[in-house]
Image: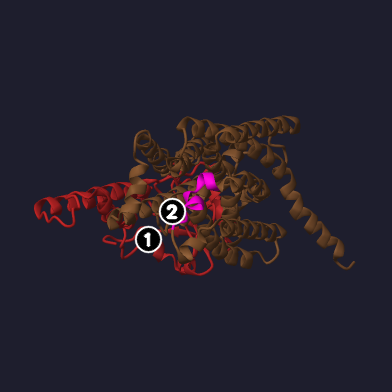
Amino acid sequence: MREPTPRTTVFGIMAEFDRPERLVEGARRAREAGFEQLDAYSPFPVEGLSKELGFRDRRVSWLTLAGGILGMTLGFWMQVYTNEDYSILIGGRPLLAVPAFMLITFELMVLFAVLFSIGGMLALNRLPRLHHPVFDVKAFDLAHTDRFFLMILASDRSFDRDETKAFLADLHPVGVHTVEHTEEPE
Amino acid sequence: MNEPLFPAPFSRNVGFCGGLSAGLALCLALFEPTALFGWLTAFLFWSSVPLGALCLVMMMRLISGAWRDELGQEAEAALLLLPLAALALIPLLFALPVLYGWVKEPVGQGFRGIYLSRGIFVGRTAVFLIAAGGIAALLLMRRRSSAIGALGLIAFMILHTMFAVDWVMSLDPHFHSSGLGLYLLSIETVIAIAFLLLLKLIAGPPPNNTDILGGVLFCALLIWAYFAFMQYLIIWSTNFPPGVLWYEHRAEGMWSPVEYAIGTLALVPALLLLFEPIRGDARWLALLCLSTLLGKALEVAWLVLPAASGPPLVSFAATVLAFAGMGAVCLSAMAAALRIAPRIGRERSEGKVRHEPR
């Protein structure tokens, strides 16, 4: 999902719901109406929401796999290298003792997979970030407690300031908010 | 499951053919008693369905989630196969001197000698089967589920290690590995999961959460890989002769390619299950279950048959006959159990309604 550039009139339009089911329902209807650039905010994970939002981004999974493979290779290579470079023969153990190498190989695979997973998630979310346009909406503070927000971003092809606003008002939300662009830098 | 697995007459015929094949294996054993090594192999594989399912049902009582809704009925039905497993064990009890060297030549004085004596061995097996049956019955009655699940898992883990030491480890009385019980249990659980999953994918209504079922199989395969490798690593590191010989013996001749096949048939499915489109596809998952089951059948044979004395062709023939026989009986019994198992719960809940004051 691409964030709207400052060339669009506003950042997006956001509907505020008081129940998680309404948010999921709203996301479903927005997708049915042809909107694709959606985002949602809720105080806790809502089951089925990512599916209704059409979230099919697998980049973090692939990054995790890549990290795992890299860690595995590095871990194994590190042990082969040290044993070849500083060869100490102990108790008839072969220099390249593959069974014993497996533990460190496994540990580094897990370490790199986790680091790639968390680092990739942060980078793809453009985090850490000091400010976000939604913070300018006053009611947005409630997204931490008991309100659920559905936003249609201005980068959507079918976005029209007035029509989209009318569409969101049709979903029976508690309120509809226009999210303005913030001044750079964020 | 509302619709039958397959029609009752067909199921009966399958069971009958299975009984016939198993009977042939036993006839073979009358002429050449070492054929019972094949029977032991088949027993260890097919008894995994109820024993592994017992472990699964206890975990299902403690761990909620979609896997419980998807596999719960099948796993509970598999518990009803426990008496059949006990029945399959009877021929082996008569043949202990053939299977276990320590019956004829006691392996030591003192505790070890007493522990490995025929009467006490049979007694331990009886304790294990009665305990397993008792836990299964309590689970099926669905009373105080989580307590039975938690205590049952602890008790079962200890008793199962005893069972594994007796029936598998003592095939070689000098071999010692404290991880063998857990290793065998991981094999049994993988077999139970793959078998029940395959049954559900082929015969049942299409599952709602195929990817979660794939995740369960993935998890089981990883646990198996951990226990299988840990036992190997510990024996490799200590480098003591009995353990090394145990593995060396299992890497000789045709057992060497079998070892590679065991690893490949389990690790390739585990790798493929990483990918969501494969994990979520019923046909792929069925294929991976088949591969897993084949690998585990080889692994059970790899554990038992290298210890077999007598002509290898006979124990091979007996393994095939007994394996096919017990498998067919198991399938046919499963079809019946799937019809009976849901009724056990329902009668209880209907009974509850009747007893309530009006």
Q: Position of residue A164 (x, y in %)?
A: 50, 49
The chosen color scheme is by chain
Magenta highlight: main SS: helix
Q: In this view, does A87 lie to the left or right of A65?
A: left
Q: Is residue A5 above or below residue B309?
A: below
Identify which residue is drawn at 43% across, 65% down: A137
Q: Which residue lies most toward the left here?
A: A85
* Host chain of mark 2: B
Residue A25 visible to an observer of this rendering: no
Q: What element carries label 1?
A: helix
**Callout 2 environment at 10 Å: few (<14), some (14 to 19), or many (20+)?**
some
Q: Which residue is the site of mark 2? A: B173
Give the extent of the magenta segment. Answer: B97-107
Q: Is residue B241 left or right of residue B35?
A: left
Q: What element carries label 2?
A: loop
In the figure, what tint was chain A given? red
**Callout 1 environment at 10 Å: few (<14), some (14 to 19), or many (20+)?**
some
